[in-house]
Amino acid sequence: MKIKIYKSIQNEFKSIDQTKKRAHKNFIIKKDLERIYESLFLYSVTLFENYIENLFLWILRNEIKWKHGSKISLSKDYKFISSIDKKHIEKIILWEKWSYLDWLPFSKTTSRAHKFLLDGRPFADLDDNDKFTISHIYAIRNYIAHKSNQSKLKLDKTLPIRFKNIYDLLTRIHSWDKTFFEYYLLSLNSIAWKLQNDLQQVK
């Protein structure tokens, strides 16, 4: 059974793919397509980050539990969170040192998960292949957002493929007849599903 917030992000990813397909059918110049691909990619990553944050907060608020019925255990130092009013958890705990939270690179998510959740689960359960894919996505996201020499060097190091621009990269075939854009979109959706697969909403 899919939890509510996963259903939401799954529908959004499907919508993004449909937008991309409609863009190719219309008579627009290549520069427009470049901007569309960049915008859709950034939006996809933003959706994924929002999903992680919402899932994390739902867990802390005891609104999600393991499928076998038990609560998701908090770490020893933060067991007191369960006694705090749900609406205050976000302010009192997560924003105690930050004005906002960022969840990528994914090491920030796992670090925060280990701090608040026993063994960092479910976020620490993600396998290395998925973390590797997220690192590629994050590097592309940074290059689109900043267009700096530093972000380009980081992208070249993370994803050693020669390309003219982001559009050239994202429209190349990655595997299974899927472009890089399609592969990364499917990957984000798959990772989002994995994070919630052993969970269920508390009724």
Image (cartoon, rainbow, N blue to C red):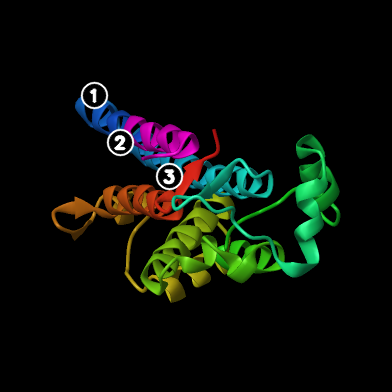
Q: In which quarter of the image is the N terminus?
A: top left
The tally of labels here is 3
- Which residue in the structure is indicated by mark 2? 17
The residue carrying pointer 1 sits among few (fewer than 14), some (14 to 19) or many (20 or more) residues within 10 Å by Cα, namely few
- Which residue in the structure is indicated by mark 1? 27
Q: What's under tag 2, amino acid-wise?
A: Asp
Does residue 15 appear to the left or right of 66 in the view shown?
Answer: left
- Tell me the magenta residue range: 1-15
Q: Is residue 94 visible?
A: no
Q: Can residue 22 be seen in this view?
A: yes
Residues under numbered marks 1 and 2 in contact, where contact means CB atoms less than 8 Å apart: no
Residues under numbered marks 1 and 3 in contact, where contact means CB atoms less than 8 Å apart: no
Q: Nearer the viewer, residue 189 or 150?
A: 189
**Label 1 vs label 3, nearer the camera:** 3
Residue 41 circle label: 3
Task: Residue 195: give x, y in percent of width and height.
Answer: 45, 54
Q: What's under tag 1, amino acid-wise?
A: Phe
Q: In which quarter of the image is the C terminus?
A: top right
Q: Which of 149 and 13 is in front in this view?
A: 13
Task: Residue 117: give x, y in percent of width and height.
Answer: 65, 62
Label 2's element? helix
